Structure formats: structure tokens, C-alpha cells
Amino acid sequence: MEIKKIIDECMGYVERYSKIIVKFSLSALGVIVLVMVILLNKNTGVRAESKLLLDNIENKQYSVAIDYYENIEKKLSGAKREKFNRTISTKINKFLIANGDKYISGELSKEQFINLINTINALNGLDINKTDIINQAKRVADVYENDKIDYDVAISYINSVSILTDVNGKLDKCKKDIETFKESREIFKLGQANQEAKKYFEAIENYNKVVKSDKAYYDLAQKEKKECIDKMYDHYIKLAEANNKDGEYESSLMYVGYLKPYYTDDAKLQNLEKECQGNMKLYTMSNEDIINRVSKESNIPADELSVESLSQMIGDDKYYYAEVYRDKKLINEVLIQAETKKIYSYKYEKKDYDVDYGSGYFMIDENGSYKFSISEDNAKKLVEKRLVEKNVKYKKLDFVDEEEADKRIGSTKKVEDILKDEKNIYYYIRVNKGFFKEKDILVVNIYTKMIYNISNGEETEY
């Protein structure tokens, strides 16, 4: 009963004051609508202005966009300016991320992307979402790691967005990852090139430097490394044997060293190493060894000599060629046989160091071949044999010098006139046939072994 009474009283109150209630309600509704209109007008203005700015940026009218933004900043009050900046920041952030994806996929050029970055930097009031940029940079590093974009695109993206205000320094890890992968992959490619060239040791070193974090390339590197180890044995054994034969013992041991970590118990490899080490000890001469050998043969104090030397194979024998200096003056060129330590001095035509020590002389012909002189004993034997063939009776054979030979020539000509520049590559032998008999002068070429008679002032083959 009480509720019914209350309801009746309310209905009566409404009937009595209905006109007043209607007026008040309409007034309140009008105020609400007015507030909403004002707010909508404000939001519409901000949206329109931000849309116009974004349209200019999308159309690449960057200078127009910058001028427009500066004008808006001056025109708007503090609260409205903040509202505008929040609105345009959200839109430009989405636009920037979208264009970053386009740049990565190749739809946008580097120049266009950088122009966009520079324009955004010029809009000082914007608040770009750094987290979105950092996440996109991480995606770029991941895509590069998966080998789906090349290095230039990945690193140029990182460098470009690093220009953004307050972003530089936050992308260092992404940049370092990309650089690390790039270096690792370049080393991998170098390994492939070395492997193709049969430089297996170098290739293995390259493959060992591929980083584990670059999993795809690391796995490939391990596979290629195994192939190198399989192929290197026959290749390096062959090179080691050839260098050992050629007297290049250090090179031979180098190739053996390449194989040892992977073939530790290989008997053939162990025997080859021992042979090379033995040969190197026997046949290798240092500059000091050469100086001491020349000093002993020439009786020149070792501390007065210096040499420049190199080793080389002549036939199957190893020799050391050396230029010998005394007081910085070249006094001889020698060949020293590594096994026997015999010394040969250079002598040919005008080039003669006028030395009489050692086991003989050498020359280099026009083809670059080395020729060694015969000894006096062998030259004498050649002449003896030739005299027997010619039935020439003689008492004895004597080696004479140029001056004595000149006296025995039955002509006004001298040895120098007859033999000219080659006079120093002959042995001069006097054939003594007895008292009151003519004594012939025969000459023997120390390199060709040819015998000539110069007794009558002419060089006649004998």
C-alpha cells in the first residue's frame, strides 16, 4: 500500500510540473549536444590537419609537409598542439614501419627511404615509437641471417633508421649481428675459393672461422671442411714428395704439417716426415755455412765476407747460388753443391772473377741452363786421347799460362787475338815432342770440351 501511495504522489507531481520538467530536460539535452558538437569539431580539425600532413608525406612533398607542420605548430594552442602531435605521431609511425617493410622488400629505394627519415626528423614534435623501430630492426637482422636479403639492404636499413632522433645507439646489437654474419659468410666464400684451388689447408682455416650463431653457413662449413680433409691427403703427399725431391725440404715439411692433425697415425706420412727432416739437416746451408765454406777455400777471413744466396735444383742435385761480397764489393759468384759442399765459381767470356779456388767453374747459357767446367785432369786426358788417335808422338804435356802460350805461337798474333773474349774459358796445353822439335799449343774449352790448335795463329779444330 505504501508503494502505491508513493507512485500516485509522483504521478501527481509530474502532472502539476510537467511543463517545467520538459523545459529543463530540453535545456540539459541541448547542453550535452553542444558539448559533443564542440568536441567533434575539435577532433575533426585535428584529424583533417594530420591527414593533410600525412598526405603530403605520402606524396613525397617533403618540403611542403615540413612547412605545413611548422605553421600548424605555431597556430595551435598547447593542448591542441599536443593532441595534434599525438595523432600525427601514431599515423606517421605506422607509415614509417610500412615503408621500412617496402624498403626491405625492394619496393622503395634507399634514397626515398632516407628522405622519409630526414623529413620525420625535421618534425620536431613527433614521438616515434622506438620499440616498433627496434623490433623491425631485429626482424631485418633475422631475415639477413636466413639469407633472404643481402647485406647492403640490411645494413643500409639499420644505418638509415639510426638517423632517427633518439634511435642511434639502440640498434648497435642488430648492426653487430649483421656485420658478424657478413664477415663470417665472406670467410666461408673465401674457403670455397681456396677449396676450389686445392688449397685445402687454407680452406679449412677459413671454415673454422665461420661463427656457430650463423647456423646455416656453419653447418655448410663443417660439411666442406670434412670434404677438404678427405681430399687433402693425396694432394699434399704428392706435393711433399715433389718438394723433397727438388730439395725444398721446408716446403715439404710444411705440407706434412698440414696433414698431421688429421692423419696422426699414418705410417707413410711419418716416414716422409723423417726423410725430409734428414735431408734438410744434410742438404740445407745457411748464409753462415756458405761464408765459412768460401772462407776456407779462399783463405779470406769469414768476418770480411757476406753473401746473398738462394737454393735451386740443377738436375737431381741441390745447389746454393751465392753472390760473395768483401767490403760490400762483389768478388765472386759461386755454386755450392749441398751434398758434397764443392764450390764452383762463375767464369765466362768477359765475366771472370779471376779466382783459382774451388772444384771448377760454371756458366749459364742462352737457354738458362747451367754448364760446369771440366777439370785439368780431364782436359789432359782428352788431349792424350786425341794425340793417340792422330798417332802423334810426344814426350809430355804441360799446362801453361797465356804469356807462355804467346811465346809458342808461330805468328805475330797473340792468344787474345785468336780467342778474343773467350780466352778465359780454355786450358792452354803445350805438347812437348822432344828437343829441337816444334811444340804445339792446344787449347781445350772448359765447357764444350772442344780441342783447338792455335800454334799457327789460327784457331783450328784439332
Image (cartoon, rainbow, N blue to C red):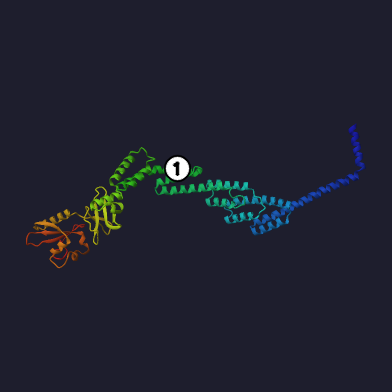
Which residue is pictured at 31% across the width and 43% down the height? Answer: 277
Rendered location of residue 41, percent (x, y): 76, 52
The foreground one among 55 and 261 is 261
Which residue is pictured at 89% across the width and 33% down the height? Answer: 3
Q: Quadrant of the N terminus?
A: top right
Rendered location of residue 258, percent (x, y): 38, 44
Residue 351 vertical placement versus 273 (above, below): below
The foreground one among 401 and 366 is 401
Secondary structure, mark 1, is helix
* Res. 233 visible in picture: no
Return the residue found at the far bottom. 412
* Res. 252 visible in picture: yes
Left or right? Give the position of 435 relative to 254. left
Return the residue found at the far top. 1
- Number of callouts: 1
The foreground one among 243 and 411 is 411
Q: Quadrant of the C terminus?
A: bottom left
Which amino acid is tagged 1? Lys
Rendered location of residue 58, percent (x, y): 65, 55
Rendered location of residue 153, percent (x, y): 55, 52
Left or right? Give the position of 319 relative to 89. left
Characterize the local packing of mark 1: few (<14), some (14-19) or many (20 or more) Cα atoms within 10 angstroms: few
Which residue is pictured at 85% across the width and 48% down the height? Answer: 27
**Which residue is tagged 1?**
223
